[in-house]
Amino acid sequence: LTRTEGEQIEFQNVQKRLKEAKHGKELELEPVRVWVDNLGSAINSAAPEYAPLISTDETLLILTARRESNVGGLRDESDNFPFEDVYYSRNSGGEWSPLRNMGEDVNTSGHDAGSGLSPDGKTMFVFRGDVKGGGDIYQSKFRENEWSKPKQLYKTINTEAHESAAALSFDGQSLFFISEREGGFGGKDIYVADWDPEKERWSEARNLGPVVNSPYDEDGVYMHPDGKTLYFSSEGQI
C-alpha cells in the first residue's frame, strides 16, 4: 500500500524520535562533567533573562530580559509579560555590574531582543518581531561610548519571511543568520552573506546547504572567532 503524504510525514517524525531516543541513551553512557554557576543577583532576577551574548574578551555581556523596567512599560497581551528589552552588564575584576537597560536608543516599546554580537563587542544585532513577515534583524554600532539606534539590515538579509539570529565572522566580512525564506531545506535555515565593499552592503545570501541545514529548524547560529567552527541548534541534526 502507498502511504499518503500525511502518513509519510508522520512516519518520518516517528523515525526521528526513535533516533533521538537511541542517541540520548548513547550520550548517557559517556557523561561529560561540567560546572554551571548562577551569575547572581547582579544579572538574574525573578523576571526571565535569556539569550546571552558575550564579547570575545568576556568583558561585555548582553542579554534579553522581560522586566518591569522595559522601555514604554507595556506588556504583551498574549502572555501578560513585559515586552522584551535588551540589557547589558560589564565585567571588571571578575565582577559583573548590575544589569542595565540599553534605553530608548536601542529599545522600543515593543519586543527588542539581542540576536548577535561581534567578537569585539562593538556591533550588535537586534531582532524585532513587530514588522511585516514576523521579524527582521537590525544592527547597532558602539561609537563614542554609546550604542547607535538600530538600523534594519539590507533586503539581501531581511525578507518578507522571518529572520532572527545573526553572527558576524571575526574579520567582519561574512554574516551568518537564520531565515525562513522560501527555497530552503525546511523551516528555519542558516544562510551566509558576504560584505561587498564597493556597494557597501551585504551580498545576496546563500543557503549553507544540506550538510548543515535539515528538513527541520536550525537556530541560534554562532561563528567561533577561529573562523572555522560554526555552532548552532538543530531540531533535525542527530
Image: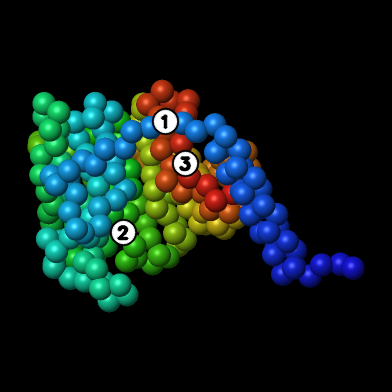
The residue wearing badge 2 is 128
Q: Earlier in the sequence, mark 3 or mark 1?
A: 1
- Quadrant (top left, top right, bottom left, bottom right) of the N terminus: bottom right
Residue 205 in sight here: no
- Alpha carbon separation for disc pair 3 and 2: 20 Å
164 sits left or right of 41 in the view:
right
Q: Which residue carries the number 1 mark? A: 33
Residue 235 drawn above or below residue 145: below
Residue type at mark 3 is Phe
Query: Residue at point 48% right, 52% down?
Result: 179
Q: Earlier in the sequence, mark 1 or mark 2?
A: 1
Look at 46% across and 48% down and name the residue there.
219
Q: Above or below — where is 179 with respect to 123? A: below
Q: Which residue, given by chain and number where applicable, does mark 3 sit on? A: 232
Amino acid type at mark 1: Arg
The amino acid at mark 2 is Arg
Alpha-carbon neighbours of circle 1 within 10 Å: few (<14), some, or many (≥20)?
few
Q: Secondary structure at mark 1?
A: loop
- Of residues 120 and 48, the one nearer the viewer is 48
Query: Could you tell me if residue 221 is visible in this image?
Result: yes
Q: CA distance from mark 3 to mark 1?
A: 21 Å
Of 154 and 114, nearer the camera is: 114
Numbered disc in front, either 1 or 2: 1
Does label 3 or label 2 sit earlier along the sequence?
Answer: 2
